[in-house]
Amino acid sequence: MVFLKWVVAFSILCNFLATPTLSISSILNKEELANISVNFLNLAKRPELFDWIVRIRRTIHENPELGFEEFETSKLIRNELDKMGIFYKYPVAVTGVVGFSGTGKPPFVALRADMDALAMQEEVDWEHKSKIPGKMHACGHDAHVAMLLGAAKILQEQRDILQGTVLLVFQPAEEGGGGAKKMLESGILDNVDAIFGLHISPMSPIGTVAASSGPIMAGSGFFEAVIKGKGGHAAIPQHTIDPILAASNIVVSLQHLVSRETDPLDSQVVTVAKFKGGGAFNVIPDSVTIGGTFRAFSKESFAQLKQRIVEVITRQAAVQRCNATVDFDTKNRPFYPVTVNNKALHEQFRNVAGQMLGIDKIIAMKPTMGTEDFSFFAEAIPGCFYLLGMVDETKGRFESGHSPFYRVNEDVLPYGVALHASLATTYLLEHQLKSTTRDQNVHDEL
């Protein structure tokens, strides 16, 4: 009966959409809006739907694929969308898929799931262990895809009451490939008004979520430098130009960029994590290669770090009579912008999550120096990214992402399904009135 009440409320809304001055709150009160979230969670927890989502997740987990190689994962997604009767575009950014549910007209809201796995060997011994040597879903992207497909199924079941269009964005190459950037460049999201994304978290209890408004994750980039000197025998260093000594001084000097040139209240990181040079105990090599990452929370700080990294490497090399070149390789490893949550969308997220889980289950997300390529979407479109807790102490320890012992608590799947569906539905409902007053010639359909 509660769900029927929700449907009737939507019908009432549709009858009054032609009235520009109508207030949404006059159609659906707080209790009725809360019912949307609760009903979606109940739908997501149906045994037949839960079992289906679990099967999808396990199938993807057994067959992990790296960035821009997700052909079988993409095929699975397309097959499931075909069964649901959902129209989609493929390929988008090589292996990406974008499905469409709803009216095909404004407003447009997007839900995103990343698809790619990591190049690592799974060490978890279980029935559905990765079948591909050296590849593993160690960051939960298999669960993300399964949850978005689950949301697609629910949304398609309720498509007659969707007051706009939901884009189901299955994105390739989140793990360093900049798949989100390539999807934006395809133009398929040009008319989208808002986008939501999630990531399961091994840090928070199941049934909780974490998010904050504003900057939540740093912008990042990678660099690699080759320091060239003159090799020779270690017993006669005066006849050489030692690139190892030059590279060592460079590594130390790069640390001063944060400790002595950065405002302590402006979080930044420069880390050298790669150092390769020489292969013998008594031979000074001709060259050394170093590499690392740099991160910041503003475009200005990021640009300054980039400039100073080049200056420090080249000038410190010159002090030691060496030459140095610096490569940021942005073609293969694009710079990631800061992930910024839109204030209005974050407030909507808090309302939806609070109605579904309880306001006490919403955790304020502390900014982190980690990165997420959802940032490309959130830079171009108002966006909101949140973490979905999955910790259950009765099921043992859950390792952090990128660990060969990474596990997913599959009990979290219905929560992601319900949050996806609720956020999209409530966004369309709350923005339908604004949409009807727009110039339809400018923003008519996707």
Image (cartoon, rainbow, N blue to C red):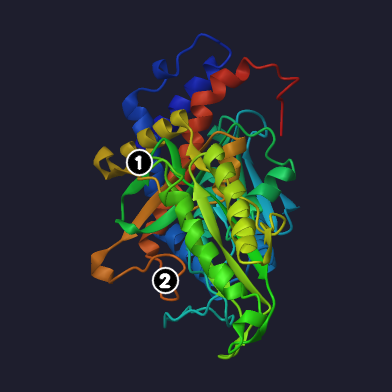
- Identify residue for label 2: 406
Q: What number is the disc on residue 38?
A: 1
Query: 10 Å neighbourhood of mark 2: few (<14), some, or many (≥20)?
Result: many
Of residues 176 and 187, the one drawn nearer to the viewer in this rendering: 176
Instruction: Identify the element where label 1 is drawn.
Output: helix
For disc 1, the neighbor class at 10 Å (few under 14, some 14 to 19, many from 20) is: many
**Could you say where residue 139 lies in the image, as x and y percent from the top left?**
48, 64
Q: Quadrant of the C terminus?
A: top right
Task: Residue 170 in the image: state x and y as whole percent.
Answer: 61, 53
276 left or right of 4? Answer: right
Quadrant where the N terminus is found in the figure:
top left
Q: Residue furthest front?
A: 238
Q: Are marks 2 and 1 in contact (CB under 8 Å)?
A: no
| Percent position of residue 259, x then y | 41, 51
Report whether 62 appears left or right of 314. left
Q: Residue at x 58, y 13 (%)?
A: 18
Report the residue at 72% width, 56% height from top. Answer: 331
Residue 321 drawn above or below residue 169: below
